[in-house]
Image (spheres, rainbow, N blue to C red):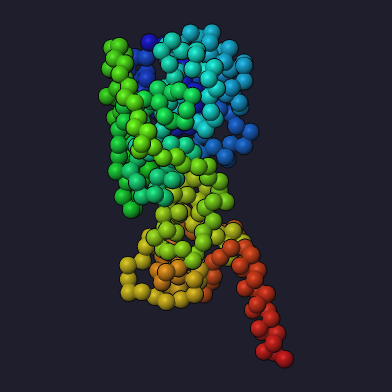
Amino acid sequence: MKVLVIGAVGTTSLTIKMLHKHGFEVAGVLGQEPINKNRVTGLSDLASLRIEYQGYKRINDPIHLEWADQKKPELIFAIGFSQILSKNWLQIPIKGCIGFHPTVLPQGRGRAPGAWTILDGKNGAASFFLMGEGVDDGPIFVQEKFELTSKDDAESFAVKLRQAIEAALDLWLPMLKSGEWNPQYQNEEDSSYYGKREPCDSIIDWSNSAFDIDRLIKASTTPHPGAFTFCNKKVVKILKSRIDKSPPYVGVIGRILVKNNNSYLVQCGHKTTLWLDQIEHESSEYNFKVGDKFGTFYQNIQDEMINKFIWAKNEK
């Protein structure tokens, strides 16, 4: 069975590997070549796979449609990229276009599904479906679910997702190759959608509870840019955290209360505290200390102005 693959990231290359494993002919790969590579999480070099390749910046440009149409594929696998295929793509393959989404569809359709799934504290899935003109709403061929715990973050999510993709394709591809074609329609009554996320959406509001901040940090960590805060007018990136379970401390929201080696206990809202286990200051030589205060950039400026005013008054 001749297939084409469109994609950009590690899940794309894994799908190609699984297609080869089960004897499918991958006749060509369309790989995203973004202008700003930092804006594509987990970008994979699909040109290095020794398969006929064409790069794209806008997948719906006529040159890519013409290139794909000349291949006469039976199927197109569109895996791991954020651009929306035009309806012209649906008419190219003999059988159809196969889409992929890492949530338990019909829940969690749309953008940034990995981050939103962790934020929501839900489980994930490797869901392969027949694409239509809607958003992740086509009938499902196979769905391999996986459990996420309170300790999982974006990094462990990616590991579990890869395992689920392998399990799903090991189950489904032999059936597909034998001619089985029986996708199951999604239940629209259970559908939900996720919206777009940007790096600025990972700025920490320390007045939130330690639980909510911990979720944000876990959803934003590697391979994503990370959650952010500010200290002394500089950007601070926070990559690892854990909720404090010791007797409660009481302090000023956003201020470091305790330092334990390279971990820092910070006061959060709702009288909760959070351990930060991996943090990076904009100035790599900066040493965090008890009493340092995290907040928004403007809040730090306001704190400095207030402190200057108070000290000036006291010195008179």
For the C terminus, the quadrant is bottom right
Depth check, front residue: 182 or 306: 182
Depth check, front residue: 270 or 312: 270
Instruction: Specify the quadrant of the image occupied by residue 230.
Output: bottom right
Residue 45: x %, y % from top left: 51, 28
Residue 53 in sight in this render:
no
Q: How many numbered tags mark residues here? A: 0
Residue 291 in sight in this render:
yes
For the point 45% across and 27% down, the residue is: 79
Residue 268, above or below 43: below
Determine the residue located farthest toward the bottom in the rendered image: 316
For the point 62% across and 37% down, the residue is: 36
For the point 30% across and 33% down, the residue is: 144
Residue 199, above or below 293: above
Left/right placement of residue 85 relative to residue 138 reads: right
For the point 57% across and 40% down, the residue is: 39
Residue 268, above or below 214: below
Depth check, front residue: 8 or 68: 68
For the N terminus, the quadrant is top left
Residue 44: x %, y % from top left: 50, 31
Residue 101: x %, y % from top left: 41, 33
Residue 207: x %, y % from top left: 49, 66
Instruction: Specify the quadrant of the image occupied by residue 173.
Output: top left
Left/right placement of residue 110 relative to residue 314 reads: left
